[in-house]
Image (tube, rainbow, N blue to C red):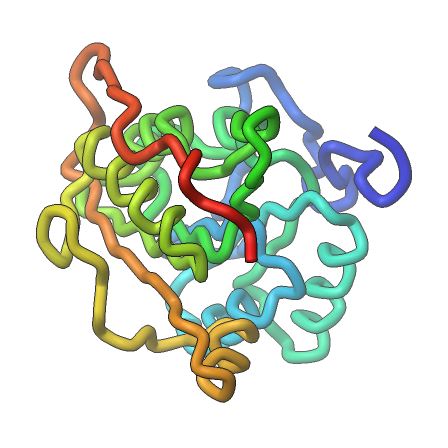
Amino acid sequence: MAGKDARALDPASLAHGCALPSEVFPDWKACFGRSAPLELEIGPGHGHFALDHAAGNPFLDLVCIETRRVDCELIRERARERGLANLIVLQGDAKLLLPRLFPPGSLSGLHVQFPDPWWKRRHRKRRMVDAELALRMRTLLRPGGAVDFRTDVPAYAQAALGVWEETGFENAAGKGKLWTDPPEVLSTRERRYLVTGQPVFRARFVNPGPPEGELALSATGRDWTDVRRK
């Protein structure tokens, strides 16, 4: 890659570099200077949710992974301005970095909000929420760890429900149902949608523990051939 996405990982934020999977992990207790529940947000964008979530929950530590360097630098600067020592931002591809950053059972929560739906058929492999991510999170999340998923695309919401449930996550709202309670922290997009009336589809899942053996997945809920971008 080139330009704003040139570096897969910001070495200033992770001094040890990027080791082989399961070989060396960051010492998050040393990075944050304490022992606290560790959460992850993938794709924070400009970081409004991450900043407010970290500020409103000082008892937890939050790691964000974002592909765009300019957004990473923006969030870091705003975190410094707000004195948030419990927020660290890394630049890179989350699916490549996850096995290199977090040992099994080390995460208490995952936030994935408004991921790119990648509408074109040839781009579907780029979607963030798929069986690969879900199975990875079954291992990295501690038993009882939560997944917070949000999207403004109804087809993505239904596809995500199928993926998380099919890989063994427990749907906190009940099988096949979306989460209807308002979130404690709104993203910038959600605040805007409160004014415009655009619906947001939210789901919450709980990890029962690491998966046992191989899980075979069907294609249910993953074909969007009847969906068109507005």
State the image quarter where residue 70 is shown: bottom right
Q: Residue at x 54, y 81 (%)?
A: 192
* Quadrant placement of the C terminus: bottom right
Whole-percent x and y of residue 2? Answer: 88, 33
Q: Does residue 222 show up? A: yes
Q: Residue at x 32, y 61 (%)?
A: 202
Q: Residue furthest top?
A: 214
Image height of 164 relative to 87, above or below: above
Whole-percent x and y of residue 196? Answer: 50, 84
Q: Is residue 143 left or right of residue 50?
A: left
State the image quarter where residue 71 is shown: bottom right
* Quadrant placement of the N terminus: top right
Image height of 22 relative to 194, above or below: above
Q: Residue furthest bottom?
A: 195
**Residue 230 or 89: which is nearer the viewer?**
230
Q: Does residue 97 show up? A: no
Whole-percent x and y of residue 224? Answer: 41, 37
Q: Is residue 125 left or right of residue 56?
A: right
**Residue 161 or 43: which is nearer the viewer?**
161
Q: Residue furthest left?
A: 174
**Residue 148 or 98: which is nearer the viewer?**
148
